Image (spheres, helix red, strand yellow):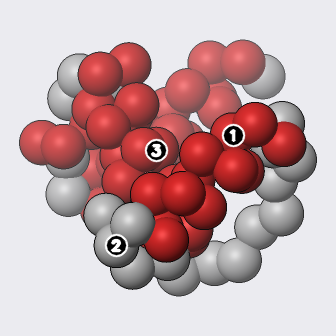
Amino acid sequence: MRIITINLPEKYLQAIQILNDMGVYPSRSEAIRIALNDFLAKELKMYKDLDDENFKMLIRSKSNKRN
């Protein structure tokens, strides 16, 4: 995994921390990973069906079309 930095509204961070404190998620990072996974599954319908290599090919294809 890679480490990234994100800026969140304080309200989001507080809500994530509450879920963490309640034991719903083991960490804030895990809560954010799960939320992002759910978002990608919804927005990029085929995301879950792609293995890593095919996903990389899709990204390269999109990059080539922009250039």
**Residue at mark 3:** 36
**Residue at mark 1:** 12
Residue 33: percent from the left, percent from the top?
A: 45, 59
Instruction: Compare marks 1 and 2 and give the one earlier in the sequence.
Output: 1
Instruction: Compare marks 2 and 3 and give the one earlier in the sequence.
Output: 2
Which residue is pictured at 49% across the width and 71% down the height?
Answer: 21
In depth, the one of 59 and 48 nearer the eye is: 48
**Residue at mark 2:** 23
Residue 42: percent from the left, percent from the top?
A: 29, 22
In depth, the one of 35 and 62 nearer the eye is: 35
The kind of residue tagged 3 is Leu
Q: Is residue 66 visible?
A: yes
The quadrant of the picture occupied by the C terminus is top right
State yes or no: discs 1 and 2 in contact (Cβ < 8 Å). no
The kind of residue tagged 2 is Gly
- Tell me which corner region of the image, top left, top right, bottom left or bottom right, holds residue 46: top left
- In the rendered image of this protein, does residue 43 appear above or below residue 31? above
